Image (tube, grey):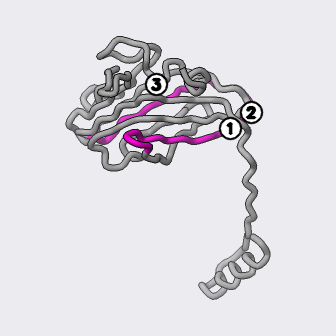
Amino acid sequence: MNIEQRSNLIKNGDFSSGKIGEMPTGWSKVLPRQVIAPSFSLVETKHGRRALMATGNGRDACFGYASRQLHLDAQQAYRLKVKFRYENLEDLNQHLVHGIFGPGFNNGIFSYEREGEQIVGENSFSTYDQPVDVEIRLYFRFSPNGKVWWEEIDLQKCDPIPPRPVRIACCWGWGDFKRWEQFLDTAGKSGA
């Protein structure tokens, strides 16, 4: 067991526990309308690992998600990472959503890279002043024939995210392109 698996705050985030053909232990599926529901089930992959698989149902409006409850501490930085494989998905951000949702809080993964045969997405975020109970959600949507095999979803506490200061230039009023060009030149020279 590697360090990443030991420190994963999402129980059964590697989908190793559960009965093949059903949902992984501790995970549930949310299907707002059965007629457009994708299929979710625990499978064994060709690589000998277990994965949560979602498949389309032949309809363009296919929509549903797998979820698990968890708790986030106040004023804490976290790193969310997902590893998966897929078939017949044209745009990952259109067909998949990997996010954390709770009262007054949401965040997720918005970019992905290929690492060998896997797709890996990662994002770091910070919580607010109060602890919050949230739901990790793995959405599958708008893909009639697509398939995804989630192999791991990992959440870890991490070092605080360094501040990213910005400078903003403000101006009141209207103007033509020449005026705005002058304004932007002046703002740029001032370090904004």
Q: Earlier in the sequence, mark 2 or mark 1?
A: 2
First in sequence: mark 3 vs mark 2: 3
Marks 3 and 1 sit apart, C-alpha to C-alpha, by 21 Å
SS at mark 1 in the image? strand
x, y (%) of residue 177?
60, 84
Residue 3's tag is none
Q: CA distance from mark 3 to mark 2?
A: 24 Å
| Residue type at tag 3 | Ser
- Residue lying at the far bottom of the rendered structure: 178
Secondary structure beneath label 2 = loop
Could you tell me which residue is drawn at 46 percent across and 47 percent down? 113
Residue with the mark numbered 3: 67
**Mark 3 Cα shell of 10 Å, populated few (<14), some (14-19), many (≥20):** some
In the picture of the structure, the residue carrying the numbered disc 2 is 75
- Determine whether label 2 and label 1 are within 8 Å by CB: yes
Marks 3 and 1 in Cβ contact (< 8 Å): no
- Give the CA separation, mark 2 to mark 1: 6 Å
Query: What residue range appears in magenta?
Result: 115-143
Task: Pinpoint residue 30: horizontal percent, then vertical percent.
Answer: 39, 24
Q: Circle 1 sits on which residue?
A: 126
